[in-house]
């Protein structure tokens, strides 16, 4: 079945897309309209896969601070290699935060700063980005702001020279790579996060230039939850009835390792992925919190699901169904950047790479012993299932979903905008090969692409050829329209990642406040990002 799914190439890779356009004269959006659900190609695993709904759902451990003195919580994380039994009986090497995948969850309070010290014991440099964080530029995880491993060759020499670092990373010859301001190297790094932001689910992950996709694939991702008193007082499901769910897809090689078709498997010199997967890598194993198609026992009560799509390229359309084909509502209470103004009820919830949703599911009407599956309506074969819940017992439930969730959402209007920009995300040529461009250009750390004033409100019109989940660093935004039509129901609230569909133009509005400095906006299809689809945002 997996071979059949791959042979059909449920989605066109970039090479096939460009070839189809050249041969037929079709626009990119027309060429991909027949496959509207994906951009990427699926890589089959070479090991037997377990049946779904047998492995218990793991809950990532919450990291304890090493210090809480002086009004700052301090944490330490070591990035290191580890071996895990993701598939039963199969040993899988990973790159991890603190030896686990996902990494440990950090829980913080709004307005209370934290500092996280990252030490790198991996065989390559890394960068840490707190996705969705309102973070000063020097802690945002710019792609060339490297944390060097102690065993990296000639570390002392590389600390003295940015150009030498990029020469060893295979990036020499790329525009801007000899600009000494483009790289900062450190053997360890303190990241400082003020946490002056709305309570929400964030996540941290590697962001090294040209190598983000394979580092994510190997395990460098973890959750970060921001809380505050006002949210705590709403009466939402809490404790064991609040579940973080990091959804990813992976493929496994014959030796049990995570199969990523990198041009350089060491991730040290030549960046890039093999040609069939330049449009995005899709795995055939769905993991939730690092477990394949897990199952979780629940009470017949309401649960809060904190959902993250941490996949490189796979989109999902989530639906909760019983074995009797009855659908349960998914009541959305929050988006990427925190609570909505009011709940929105969905039958199906689409989620693109890097998007997060905060949703309530009510199991009170499900008989004890019955099962509720979370299915992916965009999947086929093994990727159609995500996870399951088994109702184990009756239980009292005093949680609620208030009609008003939040009153602190921004109210920016078009008339407030200092600028309106059109920004195109399209396939193109990068250094003589296929790649991905923003505004017709590949990423260059030495070039300023967009410059805005601190405090300015702007409207951006984001234009896509194929699927692109676009992420803005530092700021949240509201969706104003999709191709001239109103936003979709799941566009509600304040977001930091927006999925653009093939041929679509999405208008967003935001205010560039918080901090001055150099930030990024990029596609969060990780293969697109590595192959040029990233741009600089200067806030002055």
Image (cartoon, grey):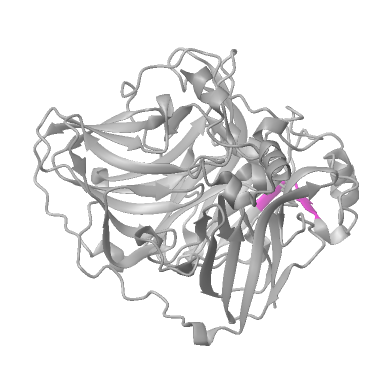
Residue 134, by quadrant, is bottom right
The quadrant the C terminus occupies is bottom right
Q: Is residue 184 covered in magenta?
A: yes
Residue 374, by quadrant, is top left
Can residue 159 be seen in the rendering of this structure? Answer: yes
Locate residue 108, reporting x and y percent.
Answer: 43, 57
Residue at 23% of width from left, 37% of height from top? 321
Residue at 90% of width from left, 43% of height from top? 157
Magenta span: 183-189
Image position of 302 (left or right of 464): left
Locate residue 39, reporting x and y percent.
Answer: 57, 42
Locate residue 187, reporting x and y percent.
Answer: 74, 45
Locate residue 93, reporting x and y percent.
Answer: 59, 23
Q: Which is nearer the eye, 213 or 43?
A: 43
Q: Which is nearer the eye, 424 or 26?
A: 26
Image position of 200 (left or right of 531): left
Residue at 12% of width from left, 54% of height from top? 398
Q: Main secondary structure of the magenta part?
A: strand
Can residue 473 be seen in the rendering of this structure? Answer: no
Say if 104 sits above or below 91 in the image. Answer: below
Q: Which is nearer the eye, 309 or 244?
A: 309
Q: Residue furthest bottom?
A: 415
Image position of 399 (left or right of 43): left
Q: Which is nearer the eye, 307 or 420?
A: 420
Image position of 463 (left or right of 103): right
């Amino acid at each position: 079945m997996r071979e059949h799914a791959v042979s059909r190439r449920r989605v066109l890779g970039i090479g096939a897309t460009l070839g189809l356009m050249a041969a037929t004269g079709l626009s990119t959006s027309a060429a991909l309209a027949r496959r509207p659900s994906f951009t990427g190609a699926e890589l089959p695993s070479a090991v037997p896969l377990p049946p779904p709904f047998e492995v218990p759902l793991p809950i990532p451990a919450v990291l304890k601070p090493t210090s809480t003195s002086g009004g700052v919580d301090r944490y330490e994380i070591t990035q290191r290699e580890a071996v895990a039994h993701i598939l039963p009986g199969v040993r899988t090497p990973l790159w991890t935060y603190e030896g686990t995948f996902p990494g440990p969850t950090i829980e913080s309070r709004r307005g209370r700063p934290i500092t996280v010290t990252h030490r790198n014991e991996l065989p390559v440099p890394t960068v840490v980005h707190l996705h969705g964080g309102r973070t000063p530029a020097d802690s945002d995880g710019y792609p060339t702001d490297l944390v060097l491993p102690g065993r990296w060759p000639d570390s002392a020499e590389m600390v003295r020279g940015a150009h030498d670092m990029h020469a060893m990373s295979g990036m020499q010859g790329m525009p801007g790579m000899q600009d000494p301001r483009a790289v900062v190297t450190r053997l360890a790094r303190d990241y400082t996060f003020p946490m002056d932001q709305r309570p929400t689910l964030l996540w941290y992950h590697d962001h090294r230039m040209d190598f983000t996709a394979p580092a994510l694939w190997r395990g460098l991702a973890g959750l970060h939850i921001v809380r505050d008193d006002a949210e705590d007082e709403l009466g939402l499901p809490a404790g064991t009835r609040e579940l973080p769910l990091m959804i990813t897809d992976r493929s496994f090689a014959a030796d049990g390792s995570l199969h990523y078709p990198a041009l350089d498997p060491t991730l040290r010199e030549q960046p890039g992925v093999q040609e069939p997967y330049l449009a995005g890598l899709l795995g055939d194993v769905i993991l939730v919190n690092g477990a394949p198609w897990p199952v979780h026992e629940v009470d017949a009560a309401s649960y809060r699901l904190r959902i993250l799509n941490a996949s490189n390229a796979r989109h999902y359309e989530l639906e909760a169904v019983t074995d009797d084909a009855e659908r349960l509502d998914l009541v959305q209470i929050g988006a990427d950047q925190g609570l909505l103004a009011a709940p929105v009820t969905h039958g199906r919830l689409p989620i693109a790479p890097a998007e997060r949703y905060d949703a309530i599911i009510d199991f009170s009407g499900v008989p004890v012993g019955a099962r509720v599956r979370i299915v992916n309506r965009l999947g086929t074969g093994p990727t159609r299932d995500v996870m399951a819940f088994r109702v184990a017992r009756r239980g009292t439930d005093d949680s609620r979903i208030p009609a008003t969730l939040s009153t602190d959402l921004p109210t920016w209007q078009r008339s407030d905008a200092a600028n309106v920009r059109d920004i195109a995300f399209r396939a193109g040529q990068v250094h003589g090969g296929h790649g991905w461009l923003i505004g017709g250009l590949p990423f260059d750390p030495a070039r300023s692409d967009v410059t805005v004033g601190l405090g300015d409100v702007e409207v951006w019109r984001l234009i896509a050829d194929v699927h692109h989940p676009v992420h803005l660093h530092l700021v949240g935004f509201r969706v104003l329209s999709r191709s001239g039509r109103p936003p979709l129901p799941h566009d509600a609230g304040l977001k930091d990642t927006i999925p653009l569909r093939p041929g679509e133009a999405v208008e967003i509005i935001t205010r560039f406040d918080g901090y001055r400095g150099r930030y990024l906006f990029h596609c969060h299809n990780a293969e697109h990002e590595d192959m040029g689809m990233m741009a600089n945002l200067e806030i002055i």
